[in-house]
Amino acid sequence: MKKKLINFVVILFLFISGTQGFAQKLITKTGSIKFQATMPSYEEVAAENKSVSAVLEQSTGDFAALVLIKGFRFKVALMEEHFNENYMESEKFSKATLKGKIEGFDASKITNASKNFTLNGDLTIHGKTKPVSVIVKISKAANGVNAIGTFEVKPEDFDIEIPSMVRKKIADKIKITYNFLLIK
Amino acid sequence: MKRKKIAFVIAALLLLVSAGIYFYYGFLFKEARNIESEMPDFSMTATKLLNEYNSNPKKADSLYLNKTIEITGKVTKETDSVVIIENNLFCLFTNKTKDKLINNNTTVKGKCIGYDELFQEVKLDQCTINKQNN
């Protein structure tokens, strides 16, 4: 009887410590992603999305981010319409994701000064997945970490066709800037 | 004869100019969708929308994506620009009022932008508060 009770307590302890392991997740639901595809001397091609979701598992450095394409806002309504209907086909491919691992991530070594990490993972845009390696600047924030950075993608890598008529108005490499404040 | 010709040219010119103006404002610089003034395509409870998305995201997307929806439910969390209804419906506001909404039954109108698998959430953007019923 007593042994049973001890067993029970041990299992209970294991269970509690197990759930504490889960509590290592840092999340955001209001991260921002901006992209910039403006060519010099042409109209600005840029948009911002302020409702990006992201999760960082602190113990392993596993990272996942998800952005809904329809949430990108442009200054010009027609540009937003073209972006959704002609280029991103957001009715069919409603989201873009990045899933990967931040190499050598160690929560205890994060300080107020931002430090560069490499994120290796798979980027899915327009229904097509490509492996990417991205530099992430991570710094400490209240109750979590701040992850920011920039990377470039080429539309043709994700089967996004740009008609030759507007080709010279849109940059070959699209600059993506992200800003995630990940908290517990 | 000459007068007739001039009148014709003037009429043609007027037509051309008005077509130009129409194209310029109606097409090139068309106003963005104003979700606030649009009539909602659907009006339902938050739980119903969430259930439909959880059971079949693809089908729900084909029904609701990019549509203006009016949602009623209990506010479970609120921050500066975001109101969360029934734990899993994420509503992003462009300019939010200072009203205290937490724990109240509220009707929110917004554009459905899709389903977030990371948190099993449905997201609306360009939301406005329609009415508040305590």
Image (spheres, coloured by chain):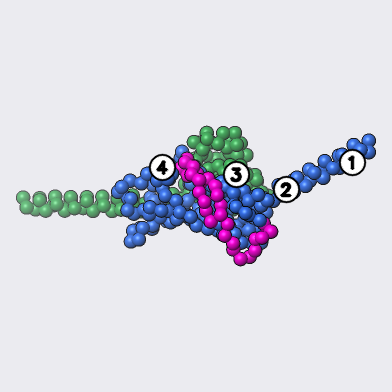
Chain colours: A blue, B green
- Do residues under tags 1 and 4 come within 8 Å of each other at their CB atoms? no
* Label 2 SS: helix
- Residue occupying the far right of the picture: A2
Residue A56 x, y percent position in the rendering? 62, 51
Q: Which mark is residue B118?
A: 3
Q: Which of marks 3 and 4 is in front?
A: 4
Part of the protein shown in magenta: A107-135
Amino acid marked by disc 1: Ile
Amino acid marked by disc 2: Gly
Residue B112 x, y percent position in the rendering? 52, 44
Amino acid marked by disc 4: Asp
Question: How crowded is the residue under tag 1: few (<14 C-alpha within 10 Å), some, or many (20+)?
Answer: few
Alpha-carbon span between mark 2 and mark 4: 40 Å
Badge 2 and badge 1 in a common chain: yes
Q: Closest to the observer: A112 or A119? A: A119
Where, by quadrant of the figure, is residue A2 drawn?
top right
